[in-house]
Image (cartoon, helix red, strand yellow):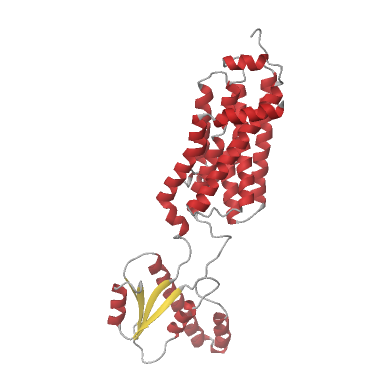
Amino acid sequence: MFLRIFTYKLKELSREYWLVGWNFVFPLVLATAFFLGFGNLIKEDPDTLQTINVGYVNQLEKSAGFEQVLEELSRENDDTALLSLHTYSSKDDAVNAMNNGDILGFYLESEDGIETIIISNGYASTIMNEIVREYVNYTDVITQISLEHPEKLAAAIDAISSENSFITEHNFGNETSQYIQYFYALLAMASLFSSWISTSMLRGMCANISERGKRVECSPASKFVSITAGILAGTLLQIVSNIIVVIYIQYILGINLGVPMGTMIVLCSIGSGLGISTGTLMGSIIKDDRLLVTVPLFFTMVCSFFSGLMWGQIKQLIQYRCPIINKINPAALLTDAMYVRATYGPTDEFYQDTYIMCAMIVICLIISTLFLRRRKYVSL
């Protein structure tokens, strides 16, 4: 009996045009819109360390220590060199190279000091000026020590020489773009869309809502078996929908979500179960047929908004002001679990988010069972 009801529920739900549109097609359309909006910002994250093409002109009659520093920063350290150094014999040659786009700026070292010449302000100019400032600070320290404590000069030079470079990049984890969270929030929204599946299913099983519900109530089939089969059928459809969206984002759009596919399938399954269970709870409480559509939609969009779907910084703002909201918002939990797994790996926070979502599923189903078991009718 269970398998037969499960099969019929799969056929029934898959033939619903609204389910195909909202749960299957709409996430794909929204993912495409996100890709067109800032897909390149994810593939080429502007926040990652990039090599800067700089020039150097030495107007001194001798070799300078600053040139050695620039050569050190031009060597590859781990993955990316900070600078790509080009030396020029005159200022005019360096200016022509900068105007042609070969370099973003150049250093001019003379008896008056080191001058930084750039074509425009921005990321590159900040790094170039910081290098000069650090170099000047080091040379001033060495000069002061040589004048006041010459016996400590050798130790000071050794201490400064032991540092690998002036500027280093600190990597907290995997290189995950800040814009990828919009795709995580999209998957969370798609998962919560499955709440409509539950409310639609219960609409056809409750005698006080539809005529078909009266027939189901009078049938000899167990209500528990019927509802369980419907819940599992809806969850399976939503899992398939989420996996299709993940495959579309990762392999067709070319956006690396940063989460192993096996872990992503597990998270999508938990998210689907979370959406189904919350929808079941709404369907067991709500008796108005119109509210069975508007309440799940309102619930999904509010949770999605506070998870960062429309405004990426809202989740961080809530975490600073009232972090408990992020721990009871199912969309925020799923988004955070994906982001933490992609950025830091399977940490304690990742498992905490996963356990909270599983606990929410169990609590919603228990409360729904209590409400559905208490329904009795005078007559059908």
Residue 91's place in the image compared with 346, above or below, is below
Q: Quadrant of the N terminus?
A: top right
Q: Quadrant of the C terminus?
A: top right
Residue 209's place in the image compared with 369, above or below, is above
Q: How many marks?
A: 0
Residue name at image x 64 percent, y 17 percent: 216
- Residue 291 visible from this viewpoint: yes
x and y, in percent, of residue 248 in the image: 51, 48
x and y, in percent, of residue 21 in the image: 48, 34
Between residues 239 and 334, which one lies in front from this camera angle?
A: 239
Between residues 373 and 206, which one lies in front from this camera angle?
A: 206
Q: Would residue 60 be found to the left or right of residue 295 on screen? A: left
Q: Would residue 352 be found to the left or right of residue 189 on screen? A: right
Residue 70's place in the image compared with 335, above or below, is below
Residue name at image x 67 percent, y 21 percent: 372
Residue 85's place in the image compared with 379, above or below, is below
Residue name at image x 66 percent, y 41 percent: 356
Between residues 71 and 229, which one lies in front from this camera angle?
A: 229
Residue name at image x 51 percent, y 43 percent: 186
Residue most extreme to the bottom? 61
Quarter location, residue 90: bottom left
x and y, in percent, of residue 165 in the image: 52, 76
- Residue 298 visible from this viewpoint: no
Between residues 290 and 354, which one lies in front from this camera angle?
A: 290
